[in-house]
Amino acid sequence: MSRFNLPDLGEGLQEAEIVRWHVAIGDRVTVDQPMVAMETAKAVVEVPSPYAGVITALFGKPGDTIATGAPLVDFRLDAEVSAPTTASGGVVGLMPTSDEEIREAPARRATADGSAVRTRAVPAARDLARRLGLDITTLDGSGRDGLVTVDDVMAAGLPQAAPRAPAAAPPQQITSALRPAGPTHDEGELEVLRSLRRAMAQSMSMARDNVMECTVVDDADIQGWESGSDYTARLLRAIAAGCRAEPGLNAWYDAASQGRRIFSHINVGIAVDTPDGLLVPVIRDVGNRTPPELRDEINRLKVGARDRTLPAADLRDFTFMLSNFGVMAGRYATPVVVPPAIAILGAGKVSRDVVAVGDRVEIHRRMPLSLTFDHRCVTGGEAVRLLGAVIADLELPR
Amino acid sequence: MKTVAEFNIRYQQLLDDAGQPTGPLPDFARDPAQLHEMYRVMTLCRLFDTKAINLQRTGKLGTYAPCTGHEATHVGVGAAMQDADVLCPVYREYGTQLWRGVTLAEIFIYWGGDERGTNFAGPREDFPWCVPIASQCPHAAGAAMAFKLRGEPRCAVAYIGDGGTSQGAFYEAMNLAGAHALPVVFVIVNNGWAISIPVGEQTAAQTLAQKAIAAGIPGVQVDGNDVIGVREVMQAALARARAGEGPTVVEALTYRLSDHTTADDATRYRPAGELEAAWQREPLLRLRRYMESLDCWDEGRERALREDCTAQIDAAVLAYQANPKASTDSMFDHLFATLPAHLVEQRETARRYAVGHG
């Protein structure tokens, strides 16, 4: 398999958008055959195939943006094509090695008795030998019936072909950490982040650079919960209770204008972990919905998030965030606020804790909670009052 | 008021759009071997262009300036020059350069980002590609001045584009050449477009050749898609220069059938239909039709030529890719006789990185 990564199609371009594919998975393509039209910031350009072979994967559909250096097409190369530089993706491996051409211009090797022995070579090998100053009749052919191949000429000619290389330290290439490099023996291949994971990288960097984050942790004693209680629906209801107690955390902060917008409706973005990266579908108006309604909406969004079928409208305008990471593992965390929202509640793994009840010791189920807030526009007092209200709601039996 | 001076600009075309002679032709135009050689290099340029663009599109070559459409001008100029002459190119005159012995691999190496591609094994004294607009014109005037001072029977040939003729350096070079009667020819390749600026917006001048008049030197127009016409005009201009009669400006009228470079998209600014019309006048077909009318060309020869050119180009790709990468030292090697201390330090740092991260 050979992978073709999107090259820089202009001068220092970071990405390009797929306009249309001219090929499909399973198609057989030849070198230089038009493969895909890509639109960059400057131009729509046709990208030809660098290989001869069969297309085994296309990375993206029309409208998708592909980062420079990210995978674009996978090929299964034609078996008969030997590819001396497949690793570097060169076109060297695709030189035509046609038998027909061989018969056209045989060179002859004079033997001691004056008879001529035919040297068989492909025209490209012949021409390369001439350019490298090699006598093709002196080369041993490794191909069928002694055919001199391009590889044979390369093998024979490369030492002489590099007279300008410095005698001492051989030139080596600096591999930037930011550029995709070929796989080496002990490190994985650099995978350029795409789509959700890339968006996550950007929003997390933005959060780090902009938000003054402060996290406070506590536990909610849920020993009294009725069996079969819906964790996520309870958490949503508790958040609504918290926001009613402290509306200042159900808000957006606009640093540029140093202003905040406090919302009357509570739209909770729920962090969903997908193989492609973080997705945050939004449950709207949680304060005015019944638990069954919330459950239906949670299910719809979870399925949509997993299948990546959610419309953009389901992914924006959250006013508060919830990370229910405890369903996997972890008790406390410092969840990250994604601006312009200013608070996120993390719910950790419920565990059976030893607690003091009056003068006695009991074992209760408790839910660890971590609340991160943007201290630029929320006081610590406001935050812990919200947390207190969340806990009070969570500790109700139903 | 009375008229104190009058000028005119003449236009040369020896083969018309259909490849038919417009009048008597020079001897070389009746010699099949010479026609074949010109057509061979023109075809090589055309096929090389396609390969170079494909290499750029697959990440194996940097930005590339195509030459499709200019082959007759480039090859006509090359064929008129003598080996001892010196070429000061812009950046897409591969036809002239190939004619003079620059190799396909050297062109690839240069556009692959390696300046060693300009270290031509063939024409050792030809100037490298010149990306700054018009600066090659004073270079050519300077070289011509040297030839004159040394008493050498050599000429310099400078290329410039239609947009480049708006640059001060072009006027300064013409002025110097005219004032000293230098053996230099300035070839304006008027392909209609300075990247996205059409020539009609570039200047109010009716012709670009007439810009020579202000410098006191002759200016002539030629059909740049007519390789025979270009060669003939250039031979006359070079003969004149070699005889000590001074410089000439030749304006070759052609059309850029490609984008400006691989980083350009001409469909965004070129009027619809203009390109299709220009393809009807393209230079290769014109020469081919003429050769066919002389019965010295046919489909079999065409096919064989294309196969031969393709093999050469494929071999050049191999040679290009086999070219060893430059060492980091090369960044420091060619600017100072004695490298300043801070650059010595940087060179050492670069070496450490080259070894540590190679």
Image (cartoon, coloured by chain):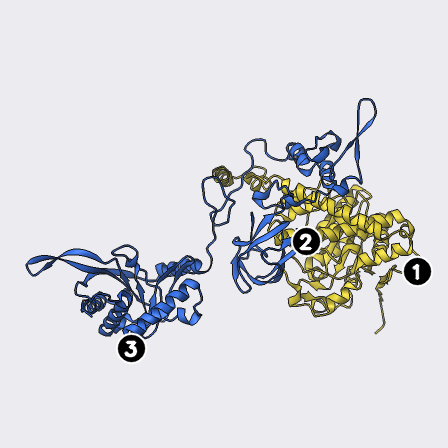
Residue pointed to by mark 3? A288
Q: Nearer the viewer, residue A293 or A121?
A: A293
Q: Which residue is mark 1?
A: B23
From this viewpoint, is residue A334 visible?
Answer: no
| Chain under callout 2 | B
Q: Secondary structure at mark 1?
A: loop
Among all residues in the image, which is located at the extreme left? A359
Check contact, mark 3 vs mark 1: CB within 8 A: no
Q: Answer with left or right where residue A44 lies relative to residue B18.
A: left
> CB of mark 2 within 8 Å of CB of mark 1?
no
Q: Residues within 10 Å of mark 2 (few under 14, many from 20)?
A: many
Q: Are marks 2 and 1 on the same chain?
A: yes
Q: Secondary structure at mark 3?
A: helix
Q: How far is the residue under mark 2 from the one under mark 1?
A: 38 Å
Drawn side of residue A137 relative to residue A170, left or right: right
* Colour of chain B in the rendered structure image: yellow
- The dot on residue B135 is 2
Assign a secondary structure to mark 2: loop
Q: Position of residue B85 (x, y in %)?
A: 79, 45
Q: Amino acid at mark 3?
A: Asn
For disc 3, the chain is A
Q: Earlier in the sequence, mark 2 or mark 1?
A: 1
Q: Position of residue A366 (x, y in %)?
A: 19, 60
Which part of the image, by quadrant, shows the C terminus of chain A? bottom left
What amino acid is labelled 2 in the image?
Ser
Instruction: Give the letter of the chain under mark 1.
Output: B
Identify whether B279 is placed above or below B336.
below
- Say which colour chain A has: blue
Q: Position of residue A347 (x, y in %)?
A: 26, 61
